[in-house]
Image (spheres, rainbow, N blue to C red):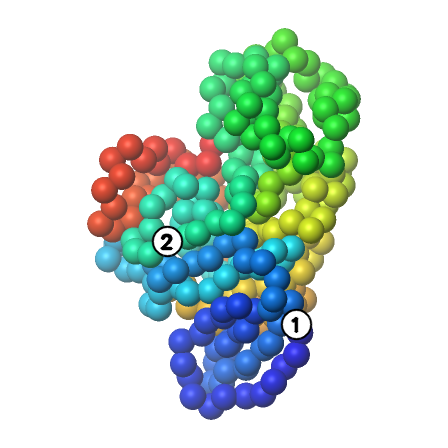
């Protein structure tokens, strides 16, 4: 990554095709990414999302027009928990944008560790069979074998004949994270890392890192430990979706710690935001949207 120079004129920040214009507090830095010829996995075209859960009229200050390139592992850093949720939910297909579109060139996985819409009355084996049918290509390309998957589950006394709703909370967390890690997606979404970064999930973290080789990651989780371990680059957003800074993960965390105010909610509170909120975007006509969130 090469710093080209400073611009005194504060223009809306954006990056496209590997070229990033980054707004600081009083000046902008132009950053050129040497991998600009890589294939874009995600393209944001005139994208705008809601930025305030109580006022649907408050949306992106400037629509997004940029690409996320293959094999990039981006931590989205913002002090707005609602914006973190909106972005992940839009990428997962749970929330339609206010305007514009997200174009993907590949398979975007459901948020890592989330339930993925599975019926809690399913047996473990039936849940796996269902997802294996839907994501058959992703299972074929996986670097994690089914034998390894079942060995990990049996170590937690999770067996094929058990019903999901009968699992303990720790078993459910382990099972849903293991499912997320089993499939090889082109783009991984990570919004919550409480269990992922726990000691109980250590073997699954290793497998996730294996699956991420050459893949794209977009993470909205707020843990700096996770960001440092899993992400290579950071994108710091203002509360209205404006890009304030972009760069390596260490410098992005340092910039955010210095200039962003404290987050309006801790990661441990994210589930309260996910459940039971009306998160439909302004002017949406998707009446079939289920606003129960990622779970």
Q: Residues within 10 Å of mark 1 (few under 14, many from 20)?
A: few
The residue drawn where x is 25% and y is 35% is 287
Q: Position of residue 285 (x, y in %)?
A: 23, 42
Badge 1 element: loop
Does 175 sit above or below residue 15? Answer: above
Q: Quadrant of the N terminus?
A: bottom right
Left or right placement of residue 290 versus residue 264 in this view: left
Residue of label 1: 34
Task: Name the residue tied to disc 2.
Answer: 101
* Residue at horizontal 38 percent and vertical 33 percent from the top: 292
Task: Please tell me whether residue 6 is drawn above or below residue 285 in the rendered image.
Answer: below
Residue 97 image position (x, y, % from top left): 33, 51
- Determine whether the residue tagged by mark 2 lies in a helix, strand or loop: strand
- Image position, residue 25 (x, y; %): 48, 80
Is 155 drawn above or below residue 86 in the view shown? above
Residue 280 lies left or right of residue 272; in this view the side is left
Which residue is at the front of the view, 12 or 54? 12
Residue shown at 69% from the left, 57% from the top: 228
Question: Most extreme residue toward the bottom, as rendered?
Answer: 8
Whether residue 21 can be seen here: yes
């Amino acid at each position: 990554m090469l710093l080209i120079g400073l611009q005194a004129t504060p223009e809306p920040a954006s990056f496209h095709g590997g070229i990033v214009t980054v707004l600081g507090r009083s000046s902008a830095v132009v950053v050129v990414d040497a991998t600009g010829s890589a294939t874009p996995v995600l393209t944001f075209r005139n994208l705008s999302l809601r930025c305030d859960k109580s006022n649907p009229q408050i949306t992106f200050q400037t629509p997004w027009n940029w690409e996320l390139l293959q094999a990039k592992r981006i931590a989205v850093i913002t002090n707005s928990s609602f914006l973190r949720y909106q972005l992940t939910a839009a990428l997962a297909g749970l929330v339609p944008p206010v305007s514009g579109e997200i174009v993907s060139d590949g398979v975007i996985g459901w948020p890592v560790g989330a339930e993925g819409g599975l019926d809690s009355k399913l047996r473990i084996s039936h849940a796996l069979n269902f997802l294996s049918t839907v994501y058959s290509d992703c299972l074929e390309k996986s670097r994690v074998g089914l034998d390894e998957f079942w060995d990990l589950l049996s170590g937690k006394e999770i067996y094929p004949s058990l019903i999901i709703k009968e699992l303990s909370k720790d078993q459910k967390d382990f099972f849903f994270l293991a499912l997320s890690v089993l499939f090889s997606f082109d783009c991984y979404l990570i919004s919550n890392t409480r269990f992922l970064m726990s000691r109980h999930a250590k073997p699954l973290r290793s497998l996730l890192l294996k699956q991420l080789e050459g893949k794209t990651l977009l993470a909205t989780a707020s843990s700096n430990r996770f960001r440092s371990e899993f992400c290579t680059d950071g994108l710091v957003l203002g509360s209205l979706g404006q890009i304030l800074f972009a760069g390596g993960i260490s410098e992005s965390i340092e910039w955010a710690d210095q200039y962003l105010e404290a987050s309006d909610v801790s990661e441990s509170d994210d589930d309260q935001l996910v459940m039971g909120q009306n998160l439909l975007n302004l002017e949406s006509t998707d009446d079939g949207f289920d606003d129960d969130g990622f779970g």
